[in-house]
Amino acid sequence: SVALFLGLMLSRLAKLVKLPAVTAYLVAGILVGPYCLGALGIEGLGFTSMENVESFSLLGDVALGFIAFSIGNEFRLAQLKATGKQATVIGIVQAVFTTIVVDIALIALSFILPEGYLPLPAAIMLGAVATATAPAATLMVVRQYKAKGPLTRLLMLVVAIDDAVGLVLFSVSFGIATALSSGQVSVLAVMVEPLLEIVLSLGLGALMGWLLNWVEQSCPCFNINRKDIGMSRYY
């Protein structure tokens, strides 16, 4: 309740300075976290430990599920045919370019800093992590400002594709980092597993979508006439 209240109040302040509400939510999360107000150790004022934060992980998982479903709901076959190629190119290029730039910068730092401060495997892994983007912030800004148009549709596709590309890049980087640490390379873990996970996720999602669509069309309880809904308001 403290987190929700603080987020609500800060979102009002963010509105005054023309900032998206999600910015206020992020600041509120930092404030009530275990390294700010929670560090005071006062129960009820904030999250006093990381264990306290992790106890609410179920809420975050459910919220991310709804966000992912909302992004998937933006996909249309006609839209994929129109901008799918463009979104794919943008998503892959920006993710790979980010990984390369961050890797070069961190690998250079690993040689400049004293030994042990930033190991080479850790630098490579951080470069892969840099490709990860949170779809929640993008979706919340789009919904808040009711953005709709070619750029918004392209952006939603890029956000979805970016996560898939990031997963592959992370697996490849993880394999390289593991090889540097132990001297053993696993082709299965580097290339096959991430691609298999993406393909199976797409297949499972398509199957569940088809099943839900079939249930909606075949079950009488879903086939309610709009006229009946309008008339029900009078009773």
Image (tube, rainbow, N blue to C red):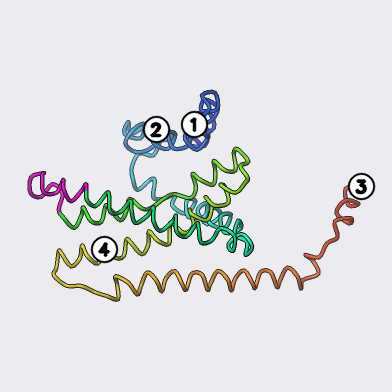
Mark 4–mark 1 Cα distance, whole angstroms, equals 38 Å
Is residue 52 left or right of 84 when viewed as pictured?
Answer: left
Magenta extent: 105-119
The residue carrying pointer 2 sits among few (fewer than 14), some (14 to 19) or many (20 or more) residues within 10 Å by Cα, namely: many
Residue at disc 4, secondary structure? helix
Q: Nearer the viewer, mark 4 or mark 3?
A: 4
Q: Which of marks 4 and 2 is in front?
A: 4
Q: Which residue is drawn at 24% across and 74% down?
A: 186
Mark 4–mark 3 Cα distance, whole angstroms, equals 62 Å
Lower position in the chain sequence, tag 4 or tag 3: 4
Lower position in the chain sequence, tag 4 or tag 1: 1
Mark 2–mark 3 Cα distance, whole angstroms, equals 48 Å
Lower position in the chain sequence, tag 4 or tag 2: 2
> In the image, what residue type sits under mark 3?
Tyr
Lower position in the chain sequence, tag 1 or tag 3: 1
Residue at disc 2, secondary structure? helix
